[in-house]
Image (tube, rainbow, N blue to C red):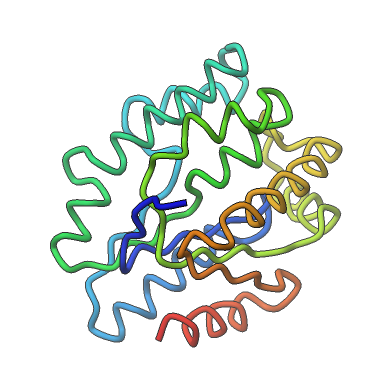
Amino acid sequence: MKTEVLKNFIVLEGLDGAGTTTQLNSLTAKLIEDNLTVFKTFEPTDQNIGRLIRSVLQKKISLEAKTISKLFVADRYEHIYGKDGIIEHLDNGEYVICDRYLFSSLAYQSPDCDFDFVYNINKDYPLPEYLFFISTPVEVCQERLDKRGDEKELFDAKEFQKQVVSFYNKALEIYKDSGINIQIIDGNKSPNDITNEILNIIR
């Protein structure tokens, strides 16, 4: 696997409810305290294609599984290469922290689309220097989602999430020799402890 690895590009992954968004905000704040310039971002994006994807996730519109998978690919292309995208910020000497990236596609879309299909349409994207997978039990994530009181999104069902875990594990195995620094973080720790663990690795 010879895909380019982008220095200072940091990706957070985990099940819905694992705490990736909390860590996105905490890590950004801490790195800014270190006098670093940080661009925090997420997928799907809040651009046009990303907003369409969110409508699908919120069950406002229904599309075929492979259509959804290809929409993520299109959103990702703009996210990486478009104006104000990840490459532009990295070229400006910034750190980029992203809540979800192509690994989420492999985990969440493979149950309906086949892993090889999802892998092949994403395999040419550049890779992050660091991938932090926040490993949190499905049951814990479900409890957190229930406490939020939000309506469950398309991929939030418990049995589906169990499939997602297996595909995350498969993705982590495939990319273990890709040049990414892959770290599995115990999601049962406190958010502050998780932040400090990640910071110690980055620093």
List x then y, in percent, for residue 184: 65, 69
Horizontal side, residue 160 vs residue 16: left or right: right
Q: Which residue is drawn at 23% across and 83% down?
A: 35
Relative depth, front residue between 49 and 106: 106
Relative depth, front residue between 53 and 170: 170
Q: Residue at x 42, y 48 (%)?
A: 42
Would you place residue 83 above or below residue 176 in this image? above
List x then y, in percent, for residue 99: 48, 54
Q: Which residue is drawn at 70% across and 49% down?
A: 170
Q: Furthest residue to the left?
A: 92
Would you place residue 189 above or below residue 150 in this image? below
* Quarter of the image with the C terminus in it: bottom left
Horizontal side, residue 184 vs residue 40: left or right: right
Q: Furthest residue to the front?
A: 1
Residue 193 lies in what quarter of the image? bottom right
Would you place residue 87 above or below residue 77 in this image? below
List x then y, in percent, for residue 93: 17, 68
Q: Residue at x 41, y 28 (%)?
A: 51
